[in-house]
Amino acid sequence: MSQEIRNLEPKALWNKFADLNAVPRPSKKEERVIAFMKDFGKKLGFETIEDEVGNVIIKKPATAGMENRKTIVMQSHLDMVHQKNNDTVFDFDTQGIEMYVADGWVRAKGTTLGADNGLGVATIMAILESTDIPHPAIEALFTIDEETGMTGAMGLKGGLLDGEILLNLDTEEDDEIDIGCAGGIDVTATAEYDEEETPQGSVGYSITVKGLNGGHSGMDIHKGLGNANKIMNRLLFDGFDNFGLQISEIKGGSLRNAIPRESVAKVIIAEVYDEAFVFDMQEIVNEIKTEFKTTEPNLEIVFEKLDTAPAKVMPSIAQFYFVRAMYTAHNGVYRMSADFDDLVETSNNIAKVVVGEGKLSVQCLTRSSVESSKMDLANALRSAFELMGCEVEFSGSYPGWTPNAKSEILDVLTGIYETQNGSKPNVVACHAGLECGILGTNYPDMDMISFGPTIKGAHSPDERANIASAQKYWKFVLEILKNIPSKN
């Protein structure tokens, strides 16, 4: 691990982040980081618990003079999103994240950084290890699998925590204090089809959409970024309607909570249309690039002729319905909030598309701060795909977090922020899936708040953490701990 990271201020925070990032921690494969965190707590001599789903709880008593303050829960999630550039050779299951400093930011070499939510985890670790930071009694809650199902938060039982206040350290703008968030639901459409032999006189092409920014499918969904799966479908739709293009396979996107940056398809057309097909596709490519020239300046769409055409393809009738269902399926912002300015209420990300060998799968993540609107959009997607004969499954549904504008801890944080920075923070609800709403189902009386340092490009290889912001955030955290209200 680069020493330049460990030398950054505040050293307590960045050293713990470096320690954490040396441990592989993909979602649903958190065994090593769970063991790491349990070992950390036990070495400090604190009560350390692993619950039945894998969450880790470490309890630290109050420092001298703070015993009469309310017990707080400091919470972050252990897992991280794994994304890398196509040309990056990296094994997330075995390697620690390779970090470096550039222009005031901490970045990773061709992969996600894990600042989401590793900086929150590192913050809590630094405070647990400290001997000179005043604080009330702390219950450190490290949840698992936040990024791909909220499994840890959903599995946390009532009665394990005594804290009256929860500080969630999982937001990404240092001038924001979050008091609400969106819920979500996974929508998955699947179908099978009988492949047919490639007709004689066919030529094969590989089509690649790449160079897109990608990003967080909640926090970045309103930015007008390109979705590789939707762009690919435009090309396939036109090629099918005008030249009888047939699909052999598609592999687009990866994780539900990441806007897809890349998609690759293998297709065939009749050789007689070869020249006209290439000409027509280039016109469409130029149109798409013009549309996205501001938000996606690095977009590339590449057509490469294959030495040998694929042996089998999707039948024309199945493809007719598939490309139309993909066109119909909503992607992006569905509805803006009527209650909060500039807040996305409901959205969908067509995250992953896999077609080939007689099977197809389309995976979406639908988000909303309004439960009825979430299900309205989910049912719209369901209808689009059921009309083409797909089976559609809803799974992983989790609730949003309803804002509490009368929160006592909100008053504490806003007062501290204004004193330290000379301006008021932005008190907001966000369109990401924070764990607060889920945790609140078993701890309904807990006063919850969420904040964090500035992180850009989360869920993409462009993820980066601002060094100056981390210093501002650390100062904020320490003052919050000093000012937790007294017990009633």
Image: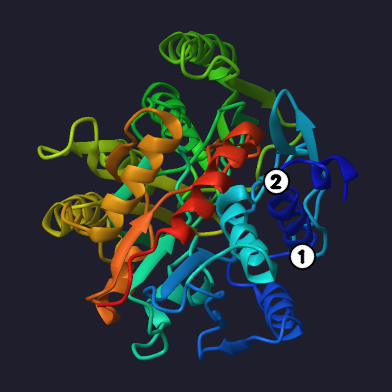
Return the residue found at the far front.
65
Residue 484: horizontal and vertical position, in percent?
A: 39, 63
Name which residue type carries label 2. Answer: Pro
Q: Residues within 10 Å of mark 2 (few under 14, many from 20)?
A: some
Residue 462: horizontal and vertical position, in percent?
A: 63, 34
Name which residue type carries label 1. Answer: Val
**Residue in view at x 65 percent, y 66 percent:** 125
Name the one closer to the observer, 125 or 368.
125
Name the one closer to the observer, 282 or 89.
89
Name the one closer to the observer, 211 or 399.
399
Residue 388 — which label?
none
Residue 250 visible from this viewpoint: no
Q: Residues within 10 Å of mark 1 (few under 14, many from 20)?
A: some
Residue 294: horizontal and vertical position, in percent?
A: 46, 11
Q: Secondary structure at mark 1?
A: loop
Image vertical order of residue 272 relative to residue 193, above or below: above
Taking the image as shown, residue 409 lies to the left or right of residue 14, namely: left
Taking the image as shown, residue 461 lies to the left or right of residue 459, namely: right
The residue singled out by tag 2 in the image is 10
Residue 320 visible from this viewpoint: yes
Q: CA distance from mark 2 to mark 1?
A: 21 Å
Name the one closer to the observer, 234 or 261.
261
Q: Secondary structure at mark 2?
A: loop
Image vertical order of residue 391 relative to residue 221, above or below: below
Indicate how the structure is coloured in the image. rainbow
**Residue in view at x 36 percent, y 53 percent:** 365
The residue singled out by tag 1 in the image is 23
**Residue in view at x 80 percent, y 43 percent:** 5
